[in-house]
Amino acid sequence: MPEGIGSGVTRSDVTGLHRRDFARCLVLGSGAALGPSGFAAIAAPPDNDTQDPPKPPSYEALLLTALVQQYPAGELTDGVLGHIYQDIAFDRIRAEQLAQVALTNADEPALWFQPRPVAS
Amino acid sequence: MNPELAFAPVTELGQRLRKGEFTSLQLTEFFLDRLKQFGPTYNAVVTRTDDLARQAAQQADEERRAGQDRGPLHGIPYGVKDLLATKGIPTSWGAAPLKDQIIDSDATVIQKLRAAGGVLVAKLAMVELAGGFGYRQANCTFTGPGRNAWNRDRWAGGSSSGPGSAVGAGLVPFAIGSETSGSIITPACYNGLSGLRPTYGRVSRHGAMALSWSLDKIGPMCRTVEDAATVFAAIAGPDEADPTVHGGPYQIATVSPSRRFRCLVLSGAEEQIQEAVKANYRQSLKMLGEMADIQETTLPDLPYGAVVSTIIACEMAAAFEELIRSGQVWELTAPEDRWGGHSGLVIPAKDYINAQRVRTRIQQAMNACLRGYDAIVTPTLTTVAGPIDTEFRHWPKGFSSTPIGTAGNAAGLPALTLANGFDEDGLPTGLLLTGKPHDEATLFALGQRLQQVTNWHTRHPPVG
């Protein structure tokens, strides 16, 4: 069984990729990464007042950029990057599902940690 | 030896060993032959441990002759999912790039079974890396797609596919599997077995491949509930090497034969399930009504799947970061597994923490739901095993975890599946009993009571 699948939303359900984001991701994957100059270009003010201000990359594109920079691999082809982009979008939808549960400050995570006694 | 011995329960094999009808060495040779002859046809075996098995069997025979009895597993052959470390024997985790991996120590479960006199005869096949990378098809391990004991054109289930088909086809008397979310229960159901997912923290995971530290469980896959209880008693209990194990040694509890159980069923449990699964479930509920009071309830409305899949994705990303960084991940068998672990590397930490916070809510809600009851009774899965050559999404009713399956794993609850019939093509269906934390004994008692009035667990495929 695919471990962890069963939320009612599957990765393959995530559709509607923003074409522009996706194209940008592919550019990132091919090496024209959003380095400092790239971010500067995105953040630069428009040339004239009539032009729409440039939009920052999407959440998914930014995370994909970070991923490609930290884990570069020749196997990260355009097609593979598209799959990972979809997975990141799925993970975001899943986080939104979790956010539907109203948690209070007192709701602690089910993490387990116990200092172990030191053997004498 | 009588070929029917291949399908005898552990309890019967133990009795016959004690009577001297055969030796452990003879029994071990019998199962080694079956593994050699039939293992490849199910893609069930990674490594046979012939020499070590013969040594262990001879030792068991010598001990028995000397009057030493290690208990019900003394001299009984068994197999383990190839994610449990075994000294001197490769432990592949089902992954092609790790097929020659040697971990130079024995998992605690292996040590405990050795102490109980068990004879390890094989490391059994599994879905690569226990399925965490999002496989969508049966062809997801270097040993080939796991074939079902009842029909080789159907899937054996995953991720403990080898233990499922090997026990189902009579290649080993019992096996050890592991579950993060569905990996014992699914292959046990598809192959008509009695399989237990223990309470989280009941069985040491030391020496087992970690997919998700806060969700992984180790459990028995057997022919009968009585066998599952016997094996569980041998492997459960404290272990200094695994700090998550809590509670003392497990004692097989006796439940009064006249005890009437109190069970819950879920409204909507019959929706979106295969007709045969529904019919067999209804028949099971009729029998259950003879021994239990049954109330209907609904599962608390919480995002079980989102919680479990977020936790697995994040913990798995940490566990296998090096596999991705090194590039070994691109050598995995299923194409989707090669990239399926990447996105977990960039999930924000707060999403993981929030999943664990919601998990606390799930634990509280499930415990409240079970208060005053012995078990929640549901169909184990919504369908019988699907075709081996078809992606899961193209199966007639798809393939996914059930809400009770993910809820039970999120809350760390024990669950016992047992065969409750067959479909028109002769494929097994299952009944799932989900119980209270640390109350495996009640699940065993209820399961054994059901197996006293049915014979599904005695049926087996015509192998050999």
Image (cartoon, helix red, strand yellow):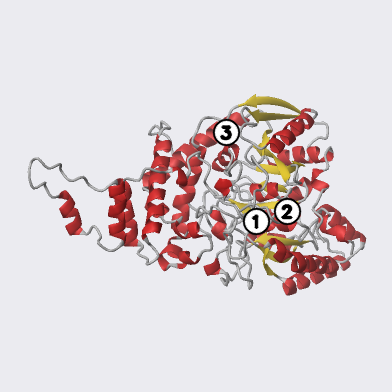
Quadrant location of the C terminus of chain B in the rendered image: bottom right
> Depth check: B401 or B231 in front?
B401
Q: Residue at x 76, y 61 (%)?
A: B171
SS at circle 2: loop
Residue B226: image location, x then y, percent: 78, 47
Identify the subunit bearing mark 3: B
Residue B24: image location, x then y, percent: 83, 66
* Disc 2 residue type (three-letter): Asn
Q: Residue at x 60, y 67 (%)?
A: B91
> Depth check: A48 or B156 in front?
A48
Which tag is nearer the camera, tag 1 or tag 3? 1
Checking the image for residue B366, the label placed there is 3
Q: Badge 1: how crowded within 10 Å, few (<14), some, or many (20+)?
A: many
Report the residue marked by disc 1. B161
- Dot 3 or dot 2: first in sequence order is 2
Residue B458: image location, x then y, percent: 83, 48
C-alpha distance separating marks 3 and 2: 36 Å
Q: Is residue B181 visible?
A: no
Tell me if residue B53 comes above or below residue B253 in the rendering: below
- Dot 2 or dot 1: first in sequence order is 2
Report the residue marked by disc 2. B151
Q: Residue at x 39, y 38 (%)?
A: A96
Query: Looking at the image, how many numbered discs can be counted on the residues?
Result: 3
Q: Report the side of B456 relative to B322 (left or right).
A: right
Q: Badge 2: how crowded within 10 Å, few (<14), some, or many (20+)?
A: some
Q: Report the side of B139 relative to B11 (left or right).
A: left
